[in-house]
Amino acid sequence: RRQLQAMKRSTFIALLVLPLWPQFTSAESPPASFAYILQADSFANTKSAAVERLTVCKRDWIVLDADFGGDTPWERTDLDTIRSGHAGRKVVAYISIGEAEDYRPYWRKEWGSKGKLTAAAPAWLGAENPEWKGNYRVKYWNAGWQKLMLALIDDAMARGFDGVYLDIVDGFETFEQDGNEFIDYAM
């Protein structure tokens, strides 16, 4: 009986995966060049100037902050224009999932500033990274942080990015090294 169930499960998985197999085996070739532009409002004074400069650059892939700067998001038309400047170009959204940054649109002033958090700070917010002012460690396992990050990813994809570049995926190491807040899910 167990063998029959295992065989049925294997057949189901094979039937599910086989139609998708061409996607897995014919991956695009990697980009020959890419640009990595964070905080594009420092790269160009206006979003339209940034779009113009990025459109004419010759890079295959461009990694951009999910927002141009502050509360100014990239729109689908911006991304389409940037993509149109180079055949096959991909535009990828940069999102830090391992640290919260006090200059991002999601940050609330009442959470704190200049490295000091207030009682209003969410439970997932940790100490400021001493090497990057304005960046705060996060308890990435907290459902509130995960919900916020998933919403940012969904928003970036809905606005027309080709994918996301998730930064600080090794954030767990700061808790592992600190020891005070190490979480061991294997227990």
Image (cartoon, rainbow, N blue to C red):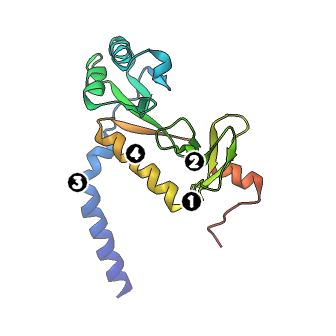
| Separation of marks 4 and 3 at Cα, in angstroms | 27 Å
Q: Earlier in the sequence, mark 4 or mark 3?
A: 3
Tell me residue 75's x, y (percent): 30, 31
Residue at the farthest front position: 110
Crowding around mark 1 (Cα neighbors within 10 Å: few <14, some 14 to 19, many 20+) is few
| Separation of marks 1 and 3 at Cα, in angstroms | 34 Å
Tell me residue 58's x, y (percent): 37, 13
Q: Earlier in the sequence, mark 2 or mark 4?
A: 2
SS of the residue at dot 2?
helix
| Separation of marks 4 and 1 at Cα, in angstroms | 17 Å
User: Relative to 54, is 132 on the left or the right?
Assistant: right
Q: In the rendered image, which residue does mark 1 sit on?
A: 141
Residue 141 showing in the rendered view: yes
SS of the residue at dot 1?
loop
Residue at (75, 51) in percent of width and height: 177
Q: Earlier in the sequence, mark 2 or mark 1?
A: 2
Amino acid type assigned to the residue bearing label 1 in the image? Trp
Nearer to us in this view, 57 or 39: 39
Crowding around mark 4 (Cα neighbors within 10 Å: few <14, some 14 to 19, many 20+) is many
Q: Earlier in the sequence, mark 1 or mark 3?
A: 3
Q: Earlier in the sequence, mark 4 or mark 1?
A: 1
Q: In the rendered image, which residue does mark 4 sit on?
A: 153
Q: In the rendered image, which residue does mark 2 sit on?
A: 110
Nearer to us in this view, 102 or 135: 102
Crowding around mark 3 (Cα neighbors within 10 Å: few <14, some 14 to 19, many 20+) is few
* Residue 120 occupies quadrant: bottom right
Q: Which mark is residue 19?
A: 3
Residue at (60, 59) in percent of width and height: 123
| Separation of marks 3 and 2 at Cα, in angstroms | 51 Å
Crowding around mark 2 (Cα neighbors within 10 Å: few <14, some 14 to 19, many 20+) is few
Q: Earlier in the sequence, mark 3 or mark 2?
A: 3
Q: Are marks 4 and 3 in contact (CB under 8 Å)?
A: no
